[in-house]
Image (cartoon, rainbow, N blue to C red):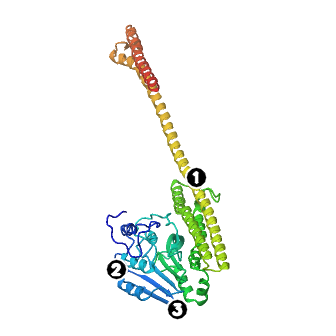
Amino acid sequence: MIVDSTAALPASHPFDPFSLAAYPQDYWARAQSRKCFQADKSKVEVNWTEVDSQRCVTQKKITTLAELSTYTNQNPPARDGLRIIGIPQGNSWRPLKITPDMLSNIIDSTRASPEILELFLSFCQRTLPVEEAFSSAPFVRWNKDNNSVLEIAYVFKYAFLKPTEDGTTCWVIRQTGIYHQYDQNTNSSTWILMHPTTTDCPFQRRLTEALVSTDQYARLMEHPLLIHNILFATYFPNWRDYLAYNQARVLPVSPVTGLTNRTNGSLDDNHRNLAAVRSVEYSCAPLQAIFRSTREILDKMHLANRFLEGHGQAEQLKTEAMRQLLDNYLNHVDAYSQSALFLQGQTARAAQLLSDAISFKISITTQAQTDYMLDLTVSTSDDSMTVRVITIVTLIYLPSTFMATLLGMNSFFEMDPNSHRLIVSPQFWIWVVCSVPLTVATVSYWWFVRRRRHKNDQKDETMGMA
């Protein structure tokens, strides 16, 4: 969306032709149109965590713009410190619990690049599962403030086992937005995290545990990128369980596996099996795009690791360990991608076989109906032949019967009163002379009409074929 107004940009967002978001006002307009922000101010929630150089952890929940402005003015970033700003959603399909003014205040106070606005577009009000395969392209930048500030931003999608209202669980795909800013001059990091829920967020819970643990916090500070691994280590293993779960949904109803012949069931059974396979196929459809995006994230992490190594911000042993860690994650992404490809092929073959089985059963039913109609036609033809024979017999007998009736009245037969014997009249020849020609004429007329009709039918059929 392009806006016509030329509203003044925040002080931290001067026009930058080298920026992906050279016109931040366009991103603000798009975020508003997508309903990325909370309209009800009573539901606003920003979780702010500060860790100073003495490893003192301060956590604060901010719900108003005035409270946020006061806090940011009174608490500038600490040297050797860590700042984590958590912005949750009501759920995965609800807007972020923050207003545009509060987000603008956070961006200004952290001096984040306007590219961060691209992340917020992924966390909006939804009524349909749109952009399931889309992950905002990972962003890395270190050319700001004389190469002293490293910025990393990405949307990380992952599989999550979600509890349902009926006490069961189901697998869903969620996303978390990450913005990380590392300042070499102050050796401090600022994180802005976009969570899909207010509660039930394992990454947020583990991050909080690491911050309050002296040992874990010390280990995390060995390399500026290690907090990313809390996110990866929390959700990466879920992909294997997600793929296994979907494969387990396919195998019992798939005719490909050979476990059982699923094509001999009724049409209703095959339709249900096909719907189950198609459901798995739909669940696996966005995986290749997600895994490709995950690879891009890890590649950008490699770039950031090399930048930190080149600027002496981490020991060589730690940067080498980070390089190996990222390579291992890349190997896992490849393994998950190959498994997803196999599962997609398996579901496609199963769906095709079930579709063929349904078509075959429909063909069998159609053939049975055709055979029945053929039998009915043959039976009708036999009945027609019988009727034809009866008609011919009737035609033969009809004239003589007619003449016998007409010339009855004892004209040809009479009873001898003396001997009581039946005597044939000398005029009997009249009946024969009249009945035989009349019978021949009647049958001949029927044969002529039938032959003429048959020839006309053959002629019409020949013209139709031509």
Decide: is 113 above or below 220: above
Secondary structure of the residue carrying tag 2 is helix
Decide: is 17 above or below 99: above
Q: Residue at x 62, y 79 (%)?
A: 312
Secondary structure of the residue carrying tag 1 is helix
Give the residue type that dot 3 points to: Cys
Picture quadrant of residue 326:
bottom right
Q: Which circle, 2 or 3, is nearer the viewer?
A: 3
Disc 2 target residue:
41
Gap between marks 1 and 2, in whole Å? 54 Å
- In this view of the protein, which residue sits in the foreground, 62 or 15? 15
Picture quadrant of residue 236:
bottom right
Give the residue type that dot 1 points to: Leu
Decide: is 380 above or below 448: below
- State the image coordinates of residue 133 (x, y, percent, origin top left): 50, 63
Q: Return the mark for residue 353.
A: 1
Q: Which circle, 1 or 2, is nearer the viewer?
A: 2
Gap between marks 3 and 1, in whole Å? 62 Å
Decide: is 137 above or below 183: above
